[in-house]
Structures are given as structure tokens and as C-alpha cells.
Amino acid sequence: MNRPLVIKFGGTSVGSGAAFLRAASIAAEAARNRPVAVVVSAMAGTTDALLGLARTSSVPAREGSQDHLLHTLSERHSGAARKAVPARLLSGVEDRIRNIIERLAEAANATLEDPAARRDEIGSFGERLSAEILADAIAGFGTPAAVAPGDPIATDGRFGDAGVLAVETRRRAQKYLHPLLNEGTVAVIPGYFGRGPDGAVTTLGRGGSDLSATVIGRALGAEEVWILSDVDGVLDADPRLIPDAALIPRLSYREAGQFAALGAEVLHPRTTAPAAEARIEVRVASTFNPGSLGTRISDREGGPGVRSVALRRGLSLTHVSPETAGDGVFCCLGADAEGIRALVDGAGVAAVVCVGAPTDGDLISGLRSLHNANIRPLYAGNTSTGLLFAVAESKAEVALRALHSALTPAGAPAEMEEVA
Ligand code: ADP
Ligand code: ASP
Ligand code: MG
């Protein structure tokens, strides 16, 4: 068997019947050349709704709103299926949607002792629903496809942010995924969760389908993992803060991992680790813009320079002592007579972190750009998270914009690049 391709579709990529069709056509087309495993998120907004449901207990007063939510979910998924799945397969998928909604209702009414277990169990149903629709939508293109049985990802059982057990996941992939791939069927895997040692459903944290994709990629020895979303790839800043943020064509696992850990939402923070371990290239691209090549993430380090900028708010600049420092430390900035200077969870301070391979020239250009924007940094220098500029929180976005345009390749004018 050729090495498989893993394709992950995010929530917007399966956000409507039309989106399911588009995603299905991409998967079916890719499956013409090699085995394909598809990892799918819940339809956009579904997980939020399910987690809201998990928070409500099954007291009679809530039953009306629970019924309403279950009805809405059922209608939304059946409606998408009617648009995306051919008539000959429709009654089958509608039955399975109904069945999953019934299981969800049972889970919502069950009195699980542990609220975290309840949250994860209920939270997993969005992916179970979307997987059924996507599999039949792919089959509609004449490509055999089926939802993989067995919830293949094995976890350590920690609810809400489970760790992945790589060896056991590989064993489960052999058992549940290989038979499908070997017979030329696209294996559709609900993302976001796995099962712990005692069989309990455990989620990988919000946005966890990205991690599911690289975990499945590692377990299958995949050739490549594509993470398909609603943006052209990894942009050099959060596009909601910097509207002219530019696509980064290539990133190393290290750079992508650091950027994701700083909150770049397009990738779950732990996505790159399994890919780096198995040296699988990850491509982040858009479901909706097939012309864009997206961002390729590999072990290749780029040259010197800043690749991207991230903003972290809600910090305080303080001293911590080695004895008391623990959770809540964002970043250490060095030691002096009073102790360790650190940015900790708090208020009043924001950090702009420049990820990549920043140079001394970048530090100087960054300081110059802040000076030109009338911002006095509270700290500037290299840290373990990247080149960091701490500023008053009220200046956070102005500082981010100034540093983005001074330091990222797309933003920086030619002469400044030469300084770097
Ligand atoms: P999906 O449902 O496909 O997983 P997400 O909503 O989780 O999509 O992630 C994609 C979103 O991440 C984008 O629409 C964008 O608003 C946001 N985002 C934040 N930072 C970045 C970044 N640096 N590059 C690209 N997108 C980013
Ligand atoms: N559906 C899950 C969430 O909303 C997982 C994901 O989107 O990756 O967090
Ligand atoms: Mg996501």
C-alpha cells in the first residue's frame, strides 16, 4: 500500500451542506492517487452548543431547552445531509443521525458522577454526526468511504486535554483503519477525541481535531497531513487583529509549534509534535481556495528572521522566587538581585512575541518601530518563546501592528530586511 494521506477538515469546512460537498470532492479527488484517511471536526458552532448542553443537568426544568437543542442539532445535520448526500444513501445517513442524536440524549440524561467525563462524552457527538455525513458525501462521488469504527485514538484518560498514547494508537489504527484503507475505502475519523484506558471518551482540548490529524498521520506512517480550514494557511499574525496578515509559505515544526503554543488558533498547540516525531510534512491550506498552496510545515529551518508575531494579553511584570514560581509564569526575563523577572498571568501588560529566528537587527528594528509609534517597551529581548516586547496592555494592538509591519518579511520594507 502507498503511504496514505491524512486530510483534516475544520468546522467551517463542514459548516453547511455545500461545504460538506466541497470537502467530499477534495477527499474523493485525493483518493484517486493514494489511500486517504479523513479527520473531521464538528459542524461550526456544534461543539459550543454541546458543551452548553453538558453544563445543564437533566433536571425537569431544563428538559424543554435540552429537547430544543437536540431538535435543532438533528435538523441542522439532516438538512446538511440532504444537500450533500445522494438520494440513494440518504435514508441510511438519516437513520444514523437519528441514532446518534438518541445516544446523545441518553448521555445528556445520564447522571455521570464526574462532570469532566460528562463534558467529554457529550462534546464528542458533533464529530460523530459530521463524520457520518462526510463519509456518505464522499461515497456520492463514487469513492468508497466509511466512518472508521472503534474511536482509534488511544489516550491517557485525562478529560478535557488528554495525552495521546502513540503505541496503542498505532495498534488501534492497524485494527480499525488499515482494513478500510487496504480495500481502497476512505476512512473517515471523527476528530477531537479518543478513548482512555478504561474506554471513556476523552477530548484533546478545544481545536483538538488538528492534533487528531497528526496523531492519525503518525499512526499510519502517512506521507503527508493536510489541515484544511477557512484561511489560506498559517498567516504571519492573527488576521482578526492584523487584516493584512500575510501567508507564510514555509515553517519549521519548531516555528509552527511555538506560534501555535502562543495561541495562533489555526493550529491546536500540540499539532506539530506527532508530525515532527514521524517527520511527516503538514500542509495548512484552505478548503475554499484550491489555488493557494498554503503553508508547508517540515523539519526544514528557514534562514534568520522573524516569521510571525503573536500577542498575549493579561500579564503582569513582576519578580518571582525560585521557591514559589510555578503555574501562571508565562515567561522568565532573567534574574537580578530581587529574584527572577517574569511575566505572569495578571493584568496591565501585553507581550508581542516574534517567532522564527530573530536576529539582533530585529531587536533594533522592533525597538525603532515602537519608538516611532510612541510606545515605551517595559521589556525587550530574546526569551525562550521568541523575541519578546512587553508593553502596557492599552498599547497592545498598536504595538502588534508596528512590530508586524517592521519585522515580518511581508511587512518589512526592503532596507529593514537588510538591517536584519
Ligand atoms: P477550523 O475550524 O478549520 O479548525 P479554526 O477556527 O480553528 O478553524 O482556525 C482558523 C481560524 O484561526 C481562522 O479563521 C483565523 O481567524 C484564526 N487565526 C488566528 N491566528 C491565525 C493565524 N496566525 N493564521 C491563520 N489563522 C489564524
Ligand atoms: N469541534 C472541536 C472544537 O470546536 C474540535 C475542533 O474543532 O478541532 O473545539
Ligand atoms: Mg481549529
Image (cartoon, grey):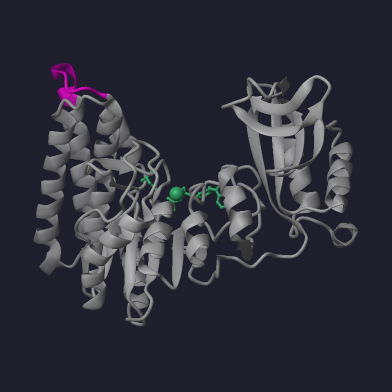
Q: Is residue 185 above or below residue 218?
A: below
Say if residue 47 shows up in the picture.
yes
- What percent of the width, then of the height, locates residue 254? 62, 56
Q: Residue at x 40, y 39 (%)?
A: 161
Classify the position of the C terminus by image quarter.
Answer: bottom right
Q: Is residue 388 above or below residue 115?
A: below
For residue 263, side relative to residue 183 (left or right) = right
- Res 378 quadrant in image: top right
Say if residue 140 shows up in the picture.
no
Classify the position of the N terminus by image quarter.
Answer: bottom left
Q: Residue at x 71, y 28 (%)?
A: 342
Q: Is residue 301 above or below residue 28?
A: above
Please say whether residue 218 is one of the residues in the magenta stretch.
Answer: no
**Frontmost residue, 308 versus 325:** 325
- What percent of the width, then of the height, locates residue 319? 73, 21
- What percent of the width, then of the height, locates residue 80? 25, 54
- Res 295 quadrant in image: bottom right
Give the number of marks: 0
Q: Residue at x 31, y 33 (%)?
A: 51
Q: Is residue 39 above or below residue 280?
A: above
Q: Residue at x 38, y 49 (%)?
A: 164
Specify start and end residues of the magenta stretch as a single range: 56-64
- What percent of the width, then of the height, locates residue 387? 76, 45
**Frontmost residue, 244 versus 183:** 183
For residue 47, side relative to residue 180 (left or right) = right
Please say whether residue 58 is one of the residues in the magenta stretch.
Answer: yes
